[in-house]
Image (cartoon, coloured by chain):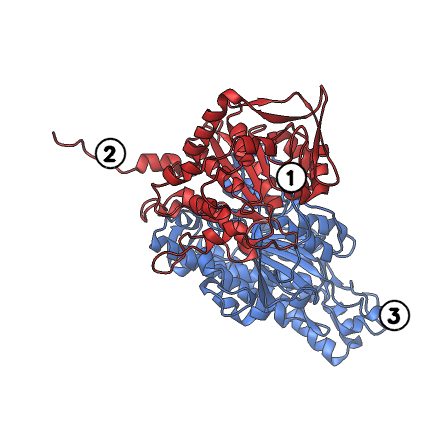
Chain colours: A blue, B red
Amino acid sequence: MTITRKALHRRSFLRGMGAVVGLPFLEAMVPAMAIGQARAARAPLRMAFAYVPNGIIMNQWNPECEGKLGELPRILKAMEPHRDDILMLGNLTHNTGRALLDGAGDHGRCSGSYLTGIQVKKTTVDIKAGVSCDQIVAKHLADKTRFPSLEVGLEDARQAGDCDSGYSCAYTNNLAWKSETEPLPPILDPRALFERLFGNGVILSPETRARQADYRRSILDFVSEDTRKLEATLGPTDRRKLDEYLSSIREVEGQIERAEKTNAQIDPHMEKPYGVPADFAEHFKLMTDMITIAFQADLTRVVTFMMTREGTSRPYREIGISDGHHPCTHHQGKPELIEKVTQINTYHATQMAGWVEKLKSVREGDRRLLDNMMLVYGAGLSDGNMHLHEDLPTLMIGNAGGAIKTGRRVVYRKETPMCNLHLAMMERMGVHMEHFGDSTGQLSFADLT
Amino acid sequence: MQFPGQGKPSVGIVFDSDLGNGVDAALALALLYGLEGKGEARLVSNSTTISNLKSAAFADVLARFYAGPPPAAGAFGGFQRPLPPIGMAGNGNLSGDTAVLKAVLDKTTADGMPAYSHGINRLNDTADPVPLIRNAMTAQYDENCMVVLAGPATNLVKVMDLPGGLELIGRKVKLLALAAGSYPDGRADPRVKADVAAAKRLLAEWPTPIVAVGTEVGDGLPFPGSSIEKDFAWAPAHPIVDAYRAFQSMPYDAPAPAMAAVLYAVRPDGYFKLSAPGIIGVLEDGRTRFTPAADGPHRYLVIDAAQKERVIQTYAELASAKPVPRQNPRFRNNQKKNAAPAPPEPVK
């Protein structure tokens, strides 16, 4: 690390053999700048999408109220502590997810169109969607961060084959599309994500990792010299912040190692990547902890997070549900199946609440990390039983640096395009477009009167 | 919604009207629901050009009335799709309530409950008509969509202005049936006067043929008031009857240009004559002028004296038809497969 001025550069790194560790936002990054620039030195705005599949039991998601948020419904109960940081958006529609003239395959369409706003081509071979809004922003910010974007997931990332009535798995398993024919598969393996964030670009095979597991040193060991040098230049507040940050990296590293060891003992033939924890919540926490660190260190400002792939039939034995998620959603009005889907929806939202708590706990100057975010939590279907593409469940979490008034529920007019939200978010990320997908204009986050 | 393998569906109708200003648009909707019940048409988008929740509520009343009772709870209850949303112009100029709207929406039963149910109480219970109309068009086979406009052109011009709007309309829409104006010339129509600029743009830029239905056709082929008294008697309460009675003192025959537009859009042959092609222009005061031109994209409807009685009879029969419960096309096969067994033959 080279410190040539009194102020640290925002994109300073701790470097060591094979390791590159970004730094969180520190006070030391501000003082040497001119006063007029101090404001600009504030932490940057980030955009993230967290996606859940198969729709939501909407009457357990939508509160009765509009305007100021009151008590949240059952599915979102875990979000209660974060109520003031949430903007619930209602009546957003993805028309391009509908059948139009392409017949069955709502799952393939809804995820394929979710961030692209495009009616994807029904095919298992020559896939075609469109550039997703996250990738438009990623391209715009490409020179600002180490990674233009991160794509993260917790389940299947197959890219070929038929995943829904003639729709390629590329549609159901990806959110981010770099071009109309190039999806960006999510990283599922915690070790792979860790190495991407902190390594020198070489991703080891699971077997190699396993061989190294017994003698692996922490990545922080490799950057210890840089760390010591940096600490010597920091004030007590920054030292504490740096210590907390490095501890969070170490914690993640430890979790990954434990998962790898556990998996090796439990089931060496398991289909999941070597280091993927068997427990969904543990996997979720591990991946979102790393996303948090990536944001904290300004390694990227754009993330898509596919909790599980669209149309998944994953069972949730963690909460006593051995039936597949997707079959349960076609409940045909049967209360016992509706209850199971509600529990799955609630389980997902509970994990999200934990992540939001983490994002709130990280300080960035006079704000919390979450305050500098637009984190959209939502799905490409509302009613999974009927495969409805209107009134999509959508939470905006974080206030975009104070630009969005949260703690409210805004219900738009019916058929308001979801792409209007994308357009508004891109604008706040510095990308101005006249239209995107089937947008009819930028979404206003003001209350509808 | 259309699915391959089920054959090309009946024509999809985008209906945009000043519902509640008079009774013409309501009668046209009743006619359209009657045609839908016979499987000849599908109402794929229904919007009002009036910025008044009661106009949208009236449209919802009709949609619910003609949808018939919801399926009984049980096997198919979970498959009941919500009724299509009602679009409503949101131009900020709130229109006043009319006698027609009040008559339908304020009517109560003997125990004080609203006589007709609807689900529109707030602005966000309605749809933005622009994406509503656009989205409906995207779901139609090419040239299997007809647009019926019985109101100012405000909404349709906004659809034209969407990115790709003109291309979409040109591809999906076979014809615009415009129930506004007088032809070849005549008095100014309030539907044109309400937004002269939009009417001018519509007639100048709309990318498909236009057949206009003027006030002269509406006046010459009125809906018979006698039908209201007898053909609708099957329903103890009927929103069309209440609207009709509220519009003017009975008995009267209501001018019905929008009915003619709907009938022509769905059944183009055998009821009307057409003018030679030409171009319709709009004057600043809202009057319309038709100028013959061999390659003009516009025509106007002409009454066929020989078919007059038949047209009026068709109006009455279709508009007063009982609701036919509509099936969800997505699950039509499931319903057939799982339908209750036929009742046993009566014992002889």
Kind of residue at disc 1: Asp
Q: Residue furthest bottom?
A: A236
Q: Nearer the viewer, residue A412 or A235?
A: A412
Residue A90 higher or lower than B288, as above or below? below
Picture disc at residue A5 = 3
Kind of residue at disc 2: Ala
Are dots 2 and 3 on a single chain? no
Q: How many marks?
A: 3
What chain does mark 2 sit on? B
Graded by Cα atoms within 10 Å as few (under 14), some (14 to 19) or many (20 or more), the crowding at tag 2 reads: few
Q: Quadrant of the C terminus of chain B?
A: top left
What chain does mark 1 sit on? B
What chain does mark 3 sit on? A
The image position of residue A10, as x and y in percent, is 78, 65
Residue B71 higher or lower than A103, as above or below? below
Foreground: disc 3 or disc 1: 1
Quadrant hosting residue B187: top right
Residue A85 higher or lower than A315, as above or below? below
- The answer, for residue B282, to whether it is visible in the render is yes
Q: Nearer the viewer, residue A126 or A435?
A: A435
Picture disc at residue B342 = 2
Q: Which residue is mark 1?
A: B189
